[in-house]
Image (spheres, rainbow, N blue to C red):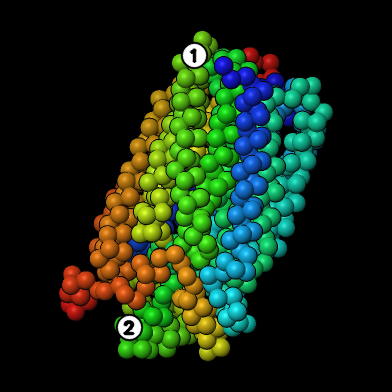
Amino acid sequence: MLSKKQARAFFLGGTLVTFLVFIGLTVYSLSEGQDQTNKETLTAEVVRGKEIWESNNCMGCHTLLGEGAYYAPELTKVIDRLNQKYDGNGEEVIKSILMSPTPWQLNGRKMVAYSMSENEANDVVSFFKWIGKIDLNGFGEIVGVDRKISPLAKDKINN
Amino acid sequence: MKYKSQKVAYWFFALSMLLLVLQITYGFIMGFARIGMDGLHEFIPFNTARAVHTNLLVVWLLSGFMGAAYYIIPEEAQRELVNVKLAYVQLISLAIVGVVAVVGFHFNIWEGRKFLEIPRPLDYLVVVNVLLFLGLILTTLFKAKRRTTTALVLSMGLLFAALLYLPGMLPFESQVTDSFFRWWVVHLWVEGVWELIMGGILSFLLIKLTGVDREVIEKWLYVIVGLTFLSGVLGTGHHYYYIGVNKIWLIVGGIFSALEPLAFLAMALFAVNMYRKGEKKHPNKLALYWTLGSAIVSFVGAGLLGFAHTLPQTNLYTHGTLVTAMHGHLAFWGAYAMIVLAIISYSLPNLTGRKLYDSSRGRMAFWMANIGMVGMTVAFGVAGVAQVYLERKFKMDFMQVQNEISIHFVVLILCATLFTTGVVLYIIDFYKHGTPTDEALEIKE
């Protein structure tokens, strides 16, 4: 029968080993050769865009890379998606939403009116562009441009 | 109650109750917004309500854990806390940091990183606060007459929780790296070190409530927390499947996440077996309800529902949908909220000297809150699965899908009302106990 001493050894040993493996895997997956994010394209605009994204808690409604609050659309492939929907004017549509002085509520749910400057809106668009090119191990295809609007949804939109 | 300084625990528990009520209020604001009733949008937009809801959850649970530690550690160490005044200072500063953060969220002041929205300057105050707390607990243990495994595991959990807050404060330019290390805090807290805290509290309660030998309970405590870390640490990988890092996490995260329910299953079996084995029948039935309930509901919410959602093949579609909210609600409720309510139910009669052990109000509170929460979980689950099929499989537009599933949020609000009624009854019971008194020192538990 297991003794208390053995149980403690199992706890301490198991914890130590798994932590070491975890740190090893972290170092490996964040190393240069394993980059899936195109680090070299991480410009000052993209970084500013990320800061704007965070300082307004956009994740409190939207999701990005599948992380967020499920109240507003997933934005990982938003530019591609809106380009498809608005004949290649996706970036302009995003900018007009961000710069709008009144709450955007095309589909019934209100978005906070951020009244951003054109520069700020450009930074956010740069951030979305960079996000959109990350290799997401298949998730990009699930939320990306090849999403076709189903006949059921089309009917609803047309009505 | 055996030591005067344990009284400070009561005020941490009272703060927990207050913040829980606020958390639920903001939950309702979000629920109503989802069915189109968003009249408060100007003052409390969804992202504010969401940040308040999740951050208050963290603060009230932490306050509950701290209260639990202030109650448990003197009994385990067989001595008074080293400095009670500083414990009150710590309580007040915790409350101030929490309130300032929540008020700030209403004025667009935050960090905007899921679960870690507290702005950076307040992060430093959190660190100071937690250091003060740990200082008090660890010094008390250091000067203790005896050092028990229960106290050790509880303190280790609290110490690691403090250390793991730090990676969340590192600045990153890349969203991917930022997210990667954010999970070091969030995941390793809730699926790692918080389980040590839960295990420590559970072990203390089982020793007190069942009368089973400490050595037996503590041996299994080691096994359970061992299983927790063995599966939970590498299980962090399930957050890394689809955020832009190496595919290796699909394998590592997939395997170890599948093992995570084992730790919770072990905890449930452990609690139920100890209860059956125990010869002592403690009269505090409500504490027993919450204790066993916590072990069982956490297995369902955190273990089974987590497993259902973290297989890579499933998660490819469920990632970033309401399925996460389904798992999150029952997991947090079972594993952490219920264990805090269990230690409160156990300690209140001892702190106040009023033995309201088995009131019908207390039992109603338990059943209504639990049935309400299960109903909420089902509502989130149905909405989430429908969202997955319509949006991810049939490629319908996000908002079209949201309109289709909005009926499930009506059900959610109804179940949340039942849940809230249960919580309110619990708080009435809390209030009826009155405040702690030195006279309770003379009453045998």
Residue B257 drawn above or below residue A28:
above
The residue at 62%/37% (across/down) is A14
Say the numbered circle drawn on residue A22.
none
* Comparing labels 2 and 1, the label whose residue is closer to the camera: 2
Q: In the depicted view, which residue is nearer to us: A93 or B45?
A: A93
Mark 1, residue position:
B277
Cα distance, mark 2 to mark 1?
65 Å
The residue at 33%/43% (across/down) is B375
In the picture, measured across the screen, residue B314 lies left or right of residue B430, that is left
Mark 2, residue position:
A84
Q: Position of residue B386 (x, y in %)?
A: 27, 57
Q: Position of residue A15 (x, y in %)?
A: 63, 39
Q: Secondary structure at mark 1?
A: helix
User: On the image, which quarter does residue A155 sit in?
Assistant: bottom left
At label 2, the amino acid type is Gln
Q: In the depicted view, which residue is nearer to us: B367 or B152?
A: B152
The residue at 64%/53% (across/down) is A24
User: On the image, which quarter does residue B79 sit in?
Assistant: top right
Q: Chain of mark 2?
A: A
In the picture, measured across the screen, residue B417 lies left or right of residue A135, that is left
- For the question of whether residue B141 can be seen, the reply is yes
* Quadrant housing the N terminus of chain B: top right
